[in-house]
Image: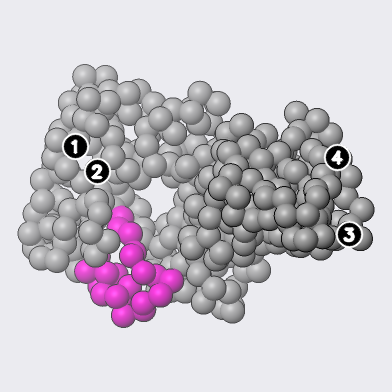
Amino acid sequence: MTRETARTWAEVSLGNLEHNYRDLRACAPDSRFLATVKANAYGHGAVPVAGCLVELGTDYLAVACLDEAAELRRAGITAPILVLGYTPPELAAEAVDLDVTQGVFTRSLARALSDAAGAAGKRARVHLKVDTGMSRLGVLDHDPARAARELEELCALPHLEPEGIFTHFADADGDEEYTMLQFTRFLDVLEELKEKYGRAFEIRHCAASAAVLNYPCTHMDMVRPGIALYGHYPDPSCEGLDGPGLKPVMSLYSRVAAVREFPPDTPVSYGCTAAFGSGGGRAAVLPVGYADGLHRALSNQGSVWLGGQPRPIMGRVCMDMCMIRLEDSDRAKTGDVAEVFGPHLPVERHAQLAGTISYELLCAVAPRVPRIYTDA
């Protein structure tokens, strides 16, 4: 698929990805780098992005589930992969066979991994997950002594290699006090493990994008940027900080399918929520809709960049198409390229209008939208 033949497509700049990688790595020069490529690399394409990051020298890749790890292994990627999320104990043998590192927080999964590794004559690498205040997954560590005891029981299983331990901040882009509370809890449980059980870990990590940018004291042995790697700040408050000037990696484009002229009082799209007035009007039809990743919440309030200026979305965004209001002076024609988001219309603008975050809109770019990789 090429730009010339695509109805709608995404352009992914591997040059900008490299820029972000190098600048983020410079933020934590003494830490290993875990590149987060879960959710199809935040919509950018897991295999090409992971391949590029491995070439650049990332130490680890992070995915959310075993299926994502398997996709990378099938593509020939041999770099260390950490599965951050839940894997059913029934799939422990597959995790061992794929030679991935599994995030562990329950005895059932830890035991299944130990048994599977023993049966295969191997050791299963694991990173223990500690819940310091996200209230999601992990061994709850509000009581450090109890948490350390539970964690040590997992570590003691015979065929596990407890390489790492990690936690996840809930509000590193908003609340410094709560972030430092979580960090202190993490440090407390690490100290308890060391003092009571002599247990230390090669890799301790807790800093995702916001903490990489905001809190150097949390970088520890490894950082794991996600959204920042793709050129977007986790929150506008992070932008003015000393450090990297991030460059967005993905832009989304569509091509004008038709330019239509309508008589007075003509309604537009489902529900007739918009209409041309008494003078009629013109619209461009774009073959991009919510099944491609254009959020339906942008109906009647979002815009695209067409003909050198923003043009408003008119009526409801359809599954596969949307309509763009044109001025009489616009010279748009079939085949013209419209920027849905990119250099002229940042995805953050769409996110604000849709009442969501850039992460969701990037991840929402559908698999049917071809990715064209540039600046390789």
Local crowd size for mark 2, using a 10 Å CA cut-off: few (<14), some (14–19), many (≥20): many
Sequence-wise first label, 4 or 1: 1
Sequence-wise first label, 1 or 2: 2
In x, y percent, where is residue 237?
Answer: 51, 77
Q: Which numbered disc, 2 or 3, marks the residue closer to the eye?
A: 3
Q: Which residue is mark 4?
A: 335
In x, y percent, where is residue 171?
Answer: 36, 69
Q: Which residue is mark 3?
A: 328
The quadrant of the rendering that contains the N terminus is: top right
Q: Which residue is mark 2?
A: 104
Residue type indicated by callout 4:
Gly
Would you say 245 lies left or right of 82 here? right
Q: Point out the stretch of residues depicted in magenta.
A: 166-186
Q: Are marks 1 and 2 in contact (CB under 8 Å)?
A: yes
Q: Report the Cα–Cα distance between label 1 and label 2.
A: 6 Å
Residue type indicated by callout 2:
Val
Q: What residue appears at the point 50 percent right and 70 percent down from the top-left corner?
A: 235
Q: Secondary structure at mark 3?
A: loop
Q: Is residue 112 magenta?
A: no
Q: Which numbered disc, 4 or 3, marks the residue closer to the eye?
A: 3
Local crowd size for mark 1, using a 10 Å CA cut-off: few (<14), some (14–19), many (≥20): many
Q: Secondary structure at mark 1?
A: helix
Most foreground residue, 288 or 43: 288
Q: Are marks 4 and 1 in contact (CB under 8 Å)?
A: no
Most foreground residue, 232 or 244: 232
Q: Secondary structure at mark 4?
A: loop
Q: Is residue 163 visible?
A: no
Sequence-wise first label, 2 or 4: 2
Q: Which residue is mark 1?
A: 110
Q: Are marks 4 and 3 in contact (CB under 8 Å)?
A: no
Residue type indicated by callout 3:
Asp
Q: Report the Cα–Cα distance between label 4 and label 1.
A: 56 Å
